[in-house]
Image (cartoon, rainbow, N blue to C red):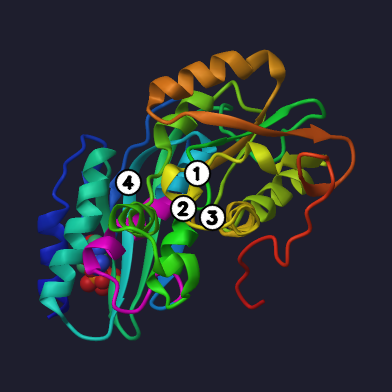
Amino acid sequence: MEFELIERIRAHCSLGRADVLLGIGDDAALLAPPAGHELAASTDTLVDGVHFPQGAAPRDIGWKSLAVNLSDLAAMGARPAWALLNLTLPQADADFVDQFAAGFAELAGQHHLALVGGDTTSGPLAVGVTVLGFVPAGRALRRDGARVGDGVFVTGTLGDAVAGLYCTQARGGAWAQLGDSQRSALLERMRRPTPRVAAGIALRGQASACIDVSDGLLADLGHVARRSGVGIEIDAPLLPTSPALLDACDEATRIALQASGGDDYELAFCASPAHEAAILRDLARSGCGATRIGRVIAGAGVRLLDAQREEIVLARSGWEHFA
Ligand code: ADP
Ligand code: MG
């Protein structure tokens, strides 16, 4: 049964690459990284009811389990190449596996990524994905390079995914009154995040530090501040907002979602003012624009400021497991 499921996954993810010397089917894959590059490796697990709602469409789970991993490679400026998939399933459900693999393969195909191995086990539904990618030696984007005087930027828009989650919960108020197109725009951001791979590659040599926004903007920038030994100020009025989110809730709620909601999978990065114009131009070309939202200062921690430069204190800065 296990082997039939593996065969189904393999059939969906049949994309071939010359640098896969031996793929699914042996005890280990044999891979040939290109000369002059470093290998970027990252893994993330998605658990039923924690990282996606119970009853989520298997196709969306397949997409998202790869998307959140590609987002980590994007944040390093790495080009994705290979993935491994650890699938834990409550039953040997062929339909589920077909749908899941189709969603996974849809995104893998967009990035010319080959699935080269994994493991299939029985237990409560969980999906672990490991991704491997390349970055030219010494050119990776890291969390520890932010410098006082740099601008702080973010790609795309913030807050949509967590607003999409709110749309699926019985929250009443404005959320219950959203129109269909607005709801579906927000839901799409939650179900199918877009990893900013091209943006990450475009930022090589230009950004001083980079992180993907998975747990919440302030929480994630907190890691950049700590690793870089600097402070960060974010201007709430500059946070980029989608049309769908703009009239979905009041301003205070919106800012809280954008600053701490998480699940956006945008890239937050720092860059010196000398690079700003080139970065904004290159990112617009890569298909996803970026917005300057703040600045790197001497000190420590991340502060969110309103238009009067008064600090906005939120109940939480981001998502934490075991909190
Ligand atoms: P082993 O017992 O040697 O670990 P398995 O029986 O677990 O091998 O797996 C057989 C082959 O199928 C291996 O190449 C493994 O990488 C691959 N594989 C198993 N599960 C998955 C999966 N969910 N996705 C992709 N490849 C898988
Ligand atoms: Mg095994």
Q: Nearer the viewer, mark 1 or mark 4?
A: 1
Q: Disc 1 versus disc 4: distance between alpha carbons?
A: 22 Å
Residue picked out by circle 2: 160
Disc 4 element? strand
Which segment is the magenta one?
A: 50-69
Q: Position of residue 204 (x, y in %)?
A: 54, 25
Which mark identifies residue 124? none
Q: Disc 2 versus disc 4: distance between alpha carbons?
A: 29 Å
Residue picked out by circle 1: 266
Residue picked out by circle 3: 214
Q: Nearer the viewer, mark 1 or mark 2?
A: 2
The crowd level at tag 2 (other Cα within 10 Å; few <14, some 14-19, many 20+) is many
Q: Position of residue 251 (x, y in %)?
A: 62, 52
Q: Position of residue 190 (x, y in %)?
A: 39, 58
Mark 3 lies within 8 Å of ligand 1 (Cβ measured): no
Q: Nearer the viewer, mark 3 or mark 4?
A: 3
Q: Amino acid at mark 3?
A: Ser
Which mark identifies residue 82? 4
Disc 2 element? helix
